[in-house]
Structures are given as C-alpha cells and as structure tokens.
C-alpha cells in the first residue's frame, strides 16, 4: 500500500523554516546544528536523505502554494494595517510587489485576504491607471495664448490662458489696482513658451508671474510672432 503523501502544513504550523520543520517532523536530522557546529559525515548523509525525501514528497506546485500563502499573509500583516490610504503612500516598488504577489495567488487571496481589501486595491489600481493617462495627456502640447498684463504703476504679469480677456477680468476682481492687457501671443504650446519667457526674465522677477520689465522688454515681447 502506498504511503500517504506527507502534507507541508500551514504557515502557522511551519513558519519560514518549513524545510527544517519537515525534516525534524519526519525523523531526519536538522540542517543547522546547535552552536553552529559542522555536521559529521553521517549527519550530512542523513540531511541529504531527508532533503531527497522532502522533494520526493512535494512537487514544485506544492512548494509554490506554500510560499504564496506566506507572501499573502505577510502582505496582510505588514502592509495592510492602515488600509488603502497607507497603501497609497507606499513607494511604487512596494505597490507593484503587492499587486504582483496577489495576482499570482488569486485562489489564496480568497482565504487569506479579506474581499473588501482586495476590491479596494483593484479600485486603487484602476484609479492609478486613469491618473497616469491624464498625466500623459498633460504632457501633450496645449495651444493657447501667452498674455502680458500691466498693473497701474508699471509691473507686468506674463502668463498663459486659452482666453486672455476672461483671465484679465478674473485677475482684476482680486487686484487692488487697474490692470491692462498689453499684448497677446498665440502659441502651440502654452506651458513651454511661458516657462521659457519666465526663465528669460528671471532676473527681473518680482514674485510668481510678476516682473519689472523695461520698455525694451515689452517691445521684445510684442515682436514675438506666433510659434
């Protein structure tokens, strides 16, 4: 009669040193001796026989399932204490590690990972994909206008907008002095051109998008053609 296949056991029963536990439970010598002493020849042979028996009794699928159980339980224990908010603050490396482990262990997730946790993670993953799509779209050139607005008293604001006139009205509602739209430049990439102009006049920057420009500076801006 064929001997019944030995079971690996649960993570609670075996822990991380599952091979050592298996060998000891089945009458074989432990691989690590007390005090770190080197094994004798007989002990080494017993260890080899024990390892051979272990791998004869358990397939790679058995071992993978056991390791997956440990991984899923470790994730629950170490990474899910604060729920999805804490997960959101993790580095991409750990987020990816968690998703990779859980996706490769779908059957185990049902047993070791609460369904609501898994659903929240899936929702987070989908939301991240949507955010990534939006981030990529923001990188695409956006046409519009570069405007030059002058404050009564001489200071100038160099900014970007798809509607400079509306932008002027909005600024005026919260500005104590009268504002005047001095010049508008139509561009294919608002963000890029605005950034270049801000860098060009960096030495004359007062605060934010406000600059102390000379008449020559303003004439230079008026001479910029559509680009």
Image (cartoon, helix red, strand yellow):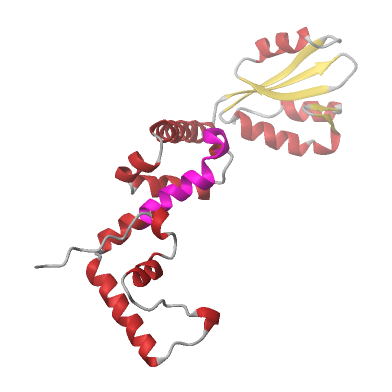
Identity of the residue furthest to the left in this view: 1
Identity of the residue furthest to the right in this view: 153
Relative to residue 164, is residue 113 drawn left or right?
left
Residue 96 appears in the rendering: no
Q: Nearer the viewer, residue 65 or 154?
A: 65
Q: Quadrant of the N terminus?
A: bottom left
- Residue 75 highlighted magenta (yes or no): yes
Please name the residue shown 72% across and 19% down the image.
183
Please name the residue shown 45% across and 47% down the image.
98
Q: Nearer the viewer, residue 10 or 168?
A: 10
- Residue 136 highlighted magenta (yes or no): no
Q: Find residue 26 and report its image quarter.
A: bottom left
Q: Position of residue 21 (x, y in %)?
A: 39, 67
Q: Quadrant of the C terminus?
A: top right
Q: Find residue 61 and report its image quarter.
A: bottom left
Q: Position of residue 95 (x, y in %)?
A: 49, 45
Please name the residue shown 20% across and 63% down the image.
5
Q: Find residue 59 and report its image quarter.
A: bottom left
Q: Position of residue 128 (x, y in %)?
A: 48, 35
Please name the residue shown 31% across and 55% down the image.
65
* 86 up-or-down from 68: above or below: above
Magenta stretch bounds: 67-86
């Amino acid at each position: 009669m064929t001997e019944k296949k030995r079971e690996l056991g649960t993570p609670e029963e075996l822990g991380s040193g599952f091979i050592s536990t298996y060998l000891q439970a089945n009458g074989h010598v432990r691989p690590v001796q007390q005090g770190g002493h080197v094994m004798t020849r007989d002990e080494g042979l017993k260890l080899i026989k024990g390892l051979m028996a272990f791998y004869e009794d358990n397939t790679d699928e058995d071992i993978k399932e056991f390791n997956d159980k440990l991984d899923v339980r470790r994730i629950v224990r170490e990474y899910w204490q604060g729920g999805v908010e804490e997960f959101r603050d993790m580095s991409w490396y750990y987020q990816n590690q968690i998703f990779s482990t859980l996706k490769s262990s779908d059957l185990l997730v049902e047993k070791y990972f609460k369904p609501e946790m898994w659903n929240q993670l899936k929702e987070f993953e989908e939301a991240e994909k949507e955010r990534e799509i939006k981030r990529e779209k923001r990188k695409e050139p956006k046409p519009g206008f570069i405007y030059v607005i002058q404050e009564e008293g001489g200071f100038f604001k160099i900014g970007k907008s798809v509607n400079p006139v509306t932008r002027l009205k909005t600024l005026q509602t919260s500005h104590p002095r009268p504002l005047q739209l001095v010049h508008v430049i139509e561009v294919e990439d608002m963000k890029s051109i605005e950034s270049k102009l801000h860098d060009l006049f960096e030495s004359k920057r007062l605060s934010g998008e406000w600059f102390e420009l000379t008449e020559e500076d303003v004439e230079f801006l008026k001479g910029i053609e559509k680009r």
